Amino acid sequence: MIDGTMDEVWNDAPEMPINRYQSAWQGATGVAKALWDDENLYVLIQVSDSELDKTSANAWEQDSIEVFVDENNAKTFVYQDDDGQYRVNFDNETSFNPASVATGFKSATKVSGANYTVEMKIPFKMITPANNTKIGFDTQINDAKNGSRQSVAAWNDTTGNGYQDTSVFGVLTLTGKP
């Protein structure tokens, strides 16, 4: 169930630290976990933040997380049909690149003080996932203050170009299916 809570199913999923900063300013950090089944990639991100802010009209300048997926792991310099960027702020408001990847997407958030958890379901659109399938993957945390983004922490990409360039994504290897 996508409800913004770390259910027992997440306990054995490896943690991916989101702590590589794209600038000198170090703000919010977090940890991501990923699971999968025959139809979807599931991502859970727990964010540690000092204060929550979504006052900017620009979604990327709000306290939010982003997940980047390149299903065929082609590492291209432009997005192809299998690529997507999924953004969710702490109030579960979403935005997508391209907009078409929103189909079938589901997310939920849970806020605790200035910290928050985002749980999401991202449908596989182009591949049939299996053990040892490698997909391009990254996640980042946008940390906002006073209506502007003050820092960006990522799992892999420190260039900040993931919104347009899949070559900066890391690699997620799907494993664990009996």
Image: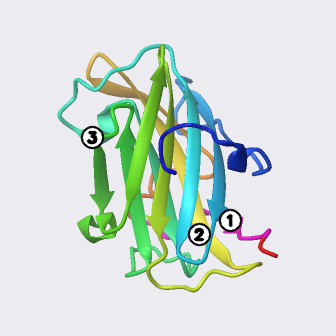
> Is tag 2's residue or tag 1's residue first in the polypeptide sequence?
2
Amino acid type of disc 2?
Gly
User: Disc 1 marks which residue?
Assistant: 172
* Residue 104 image offset from top left, x and y in percent: 35, 67
Left or right: where 163 falls relative to 159: left
What is the secondary structure assignment of the residue under circle 1?
A: strand
| Quadrant of the image occupied by residue 51 | top left
Q: Residue at x 71, y 43 (%)?
A: 8
Taking depth in this image into account, of 77 and 103 the one nearest to the observer is 103
User: Disc 3 marks which residue?
Assistant: 59
Taking depth in this image into account, of 127 and 160 the one nearest to the observer is 127
Task: Examine the rendering and report whether any part of residue 169 can be seen.
Answer: no
* Residue stretch in magenta: 165-176
Tags 2 and 1 touching, CB below 8 Å:
yes
Tags 3 and 1 touching, CB below 8 Å:
no
Marks 2/1: CA–CA distance: 6 Å
Left or right: where 34 falls relative to 15: left
User: Disc 2 marks which residue?
Assistant: 136
Using the image, tell me which numbered label, if any, was put on residue 8.
none
Marks 2/3: CA–CA distance: 23 Å
